[in-house]
Image: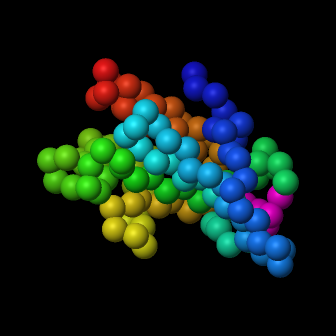
């Protein structure tokens, strides 16, 4: 089992005006960028800036692929395989091309997706 993803969340930015915050992206084996966010500007539960990531019940999660033009590039993107996973239906197309985003994803599901991405990348990268 992989580390709890919440232990990997490092605050990158917090608005001095008291709204919004972002965590650094998590890089997975040179293959994926896994962005897990929670604040008053993200689809998280609660929708608030909390100091402890372990206090959140759900997160906004974005997945993109680093070793292909887009995660859904035919023949090169990992989404062709990943879209068959039960959790994939929660990920819609992001606002930025080539990204997949899920809102209000519970902690246990985020952990499961993180572990499956690690496993997928390990198998593909060898």
Q: Residue at x 40, y 37 (%)?
A: 30
Q: Is the magenta stretch mostly helix, strand or loop?
A: loop
Q: Is residue 47 on the magenta stretch?
A: yes
Q: Where is residue 9 in the image (x, y as percent from the top left)?
A: 68, 45
Q: In which quarter of the image is residue 117?
A: top left
Q: Is residue 121 magenta?
A: no
Q: Does residue 48 lie above or below 109 as drawn? A: below
Q: Quadrant of the C terminus?
A: top left
Q: Quadrant of residue 92?
A: bottom left
Numbered circles on residues, count: 0
Q: What stretch is highlighted in magenta?
A: 45-50
Q: Can residue 47 be seen in this view?
A: no
Residue depicted at 56% across the width and 62% down the height = 103
Where residue 119 appears, x then y in whole percent? 42, 27
118 with respect to 51 (left or right): left
Residue 126 can be seen, yes or no:
yes
For residue 86, what is the image quadrant? top left
Q: In this view, does 20 lie above or below 57?
A: below
Colour theme? rainbow
């Amino acid at each position: 089992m992989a580390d709890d993803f919440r232990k990997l969340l490092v605050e990158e930015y917090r608005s001095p005006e008291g709204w919004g915050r972002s965590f650094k992206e998590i890089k997975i084996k040179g293959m994926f960028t896994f962005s897990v966010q929670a604040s008053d500007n993200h689809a998280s539960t609660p929708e608030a800036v909390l100091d402890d990531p372990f206090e959140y019940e759900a997160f906004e999660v974005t997945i993109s692929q680093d070793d292909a033009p887009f995660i859904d590039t035919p023949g090169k993107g990992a989404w062709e395989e990943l879209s068959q996973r039960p959790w994939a239906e929660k990920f819609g197309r992001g606002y930025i091309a080539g990204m997949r985003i899920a809102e209000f994803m519970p902690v246990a599901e985020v952990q499961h997706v993180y572990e499956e991405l690690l496993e997928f990348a390990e198998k593909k990268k060898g």
